[in-house]
Image (cartoon, rainbow, N blue to C red):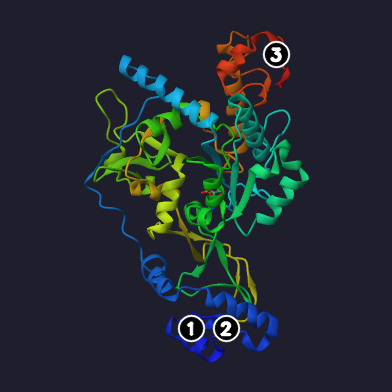
Amino acid sequence: MPAGTDVESIKRLLAEHQQEHLIGFWPQLDPNHREGLLAQIRELDFPAIDEWVESLVKGRPQPPVQHDFEPARSYSPQARSTQDQHKYAQAIELGTQLISHGKAAALTVAGGQGTRLGFDGPKGNFPISPIHRKTLFRIFAETIAAVSQRYGATCPWYIMTSPLNHEQTLAIFKADNYYGLDPRNVFIFQQGTLPNFGLDGRILLAEKDQIARSPDGHGGCIRALARSGALADMNKRGIQYLTYWQVDNPLVRLFDPLFIGLHALDGAQMSSKAVIKNGPKEKVGNFCLVDGKVTVIEYSDLPDELAERHRPDGSLVFQLGSIAIHIINTDFVEHLNTAGHSLPLHRAVKKIPHIDSQGRPIEPEEPNGVKLESFIFDAIPLAQRSIILEIVRSEQFAPVKNATGEDSAEATHRMMIERAAAWLESAGVKVPRKPDRSPDCVLEIAPSFALDAEEVAAKRDQIPPINPGDDAYLA
Ligand code: UTP
């Protein structure tokens, strides 16, 4: 809608699209607020909104065709055959070269609302490390610094925020002095937002002059990378590969030469790491092949009959779970933007605070509306080629999602200690364990000390004995 369109024609337009309530408080607004509201309305894409209301808000989207998908194939964590050993060695060499030559950068998506965790502030500021209570952001920053040092390269870090947490995230990075990183190599950019809908299809108002909006999902990074200038910055630096992860996983192995190398050797455009699911209905996406393309089918869309199917050796047929760790080529991001691809939107029924027709604030106790989001994994089938590398869960995946129980901070915490114990034991260090075999000590390995088990082994002689009940911090 062109700027300057007069109020009468906006009223007519809103009425045509059953959204006239958006200017229901017009007489009560002062000129500034009126102008602000009009600007928000002018940005709305009404034909698209009508379609979303029809298919996603009032309607139920159909799950994908259910008969013609098969499980995707993956590289295993360790090379099994001699041929594979040769390929993995070649991949590690190529990956190492690409990182050393500054061809790879880090991309964290951190624009989410983190409602399940219920933490006040950006999730990246959540303190998670077992002894020093380092925040997620700090752990990633220290890892990036250690990777830069290991490979003698600049490893830029791109972080996607949303309007809900952008200013706070910037303030945290400034207050923490960018955790010792050079701020010129940290690019914090914002994703877009989409309007929120009531279940009747009407756009909700957050205030009398404010449309209720929420971030457009992690898939929003494809567009936001281009719009924010991040992609242009990457091109200027000659970056070709993005190592993508979510802000909630402190175990992630960033700049993994094997992963980058396999991806590059196979000429892939977007690739993924996977874990073996811990049950047929684990709440992770399933890597499948649909029309020959790697595709993630959400756990809720995988028919039970397929989810429960087993191989003769007892393993699940659909065993590869998506953990939102990818390599994405910068030219693929560029292609998606210039070829006009848009990722599909998904609906999430949520509790959305808003004002009612009388202007009274409503804090719903039950889900009352729909948020729309795009998911990064929907870009995978758009890639000409895509590989999957299976990884060992306890080594690389422990997301903090919930306040308690599964995927809680406590569970992540435990996994961080377990991984440190495993690295130490593989280096021949004795770790005291309780009768139930859990470590009888608290362990934390700083990224500056070691990024993997091999580095712990190389520093074996710097590690003091660990006694039952110790807090052992290695830095
Ligand atoms: P989640 O799906 O876990 O959502 O996001 P969330 O918003 O963090 O948490 P809940 O569901 O409200 O409890 C997975 C990752 O994607 C990022 C999150 O920051 C997290 O790293 N994300 C999610 C975005 O960057 N933008 C979004 O719009 C949504």
Q: Is residue 142 left or right of residue 257?
A: right
Q: Is residue 81 above or below residue 245?
A: above
User: Helix, strand or loop at disc 3?
Assistant: loop
Task: Give the amino acid at mark 2.
Answer: Ile
Q: Quadrant of residue 155?
A: top right
Quick one: label 2 or label 3, which is nearer the N terminus? 2
List the single residue furthest toward the right: 175
- Amino acid carrying label 1: it is Leu
Q: Are marks 1 and 2 in contact (CB under 8 Å)?
A: yes
Q: Quadrant of the C terminus?
A: top right
Q: Position of residue 317 (x, y in %)?
A: 29, 33
Q: Position of residue 414 (x, y in %)?
A: 60, 28
Question: Which residue has dot 1 on it?
Answer: 14
Q: Tell whether 70 sits left or right of 229.
A: left
Describe the element under mark 2 as helix, strand or loop: helix
Cα separation, mark 1 vs mark 3, equals: 68 Å
Of all residues, the one furthest to the bottom in this rendering is 8
**Residue on which the image places disc 3:** 468
Relative image position of residue 236 (x, y in whole percent):
55, 47
Q: Earlier in the sequence, mark 1 or mark 3?
A: 1
Q: Residue at x 31, y 31 (%)?
A: 316
Indicate the position of residue 139 as horizontal and vertical percent values.
65, 34
| As drawn, 170 above or below 468 | below
Which numbered marker is on residue 23? Answer: 2
| C-alpha span from label 2 to label 3 | 66 Å
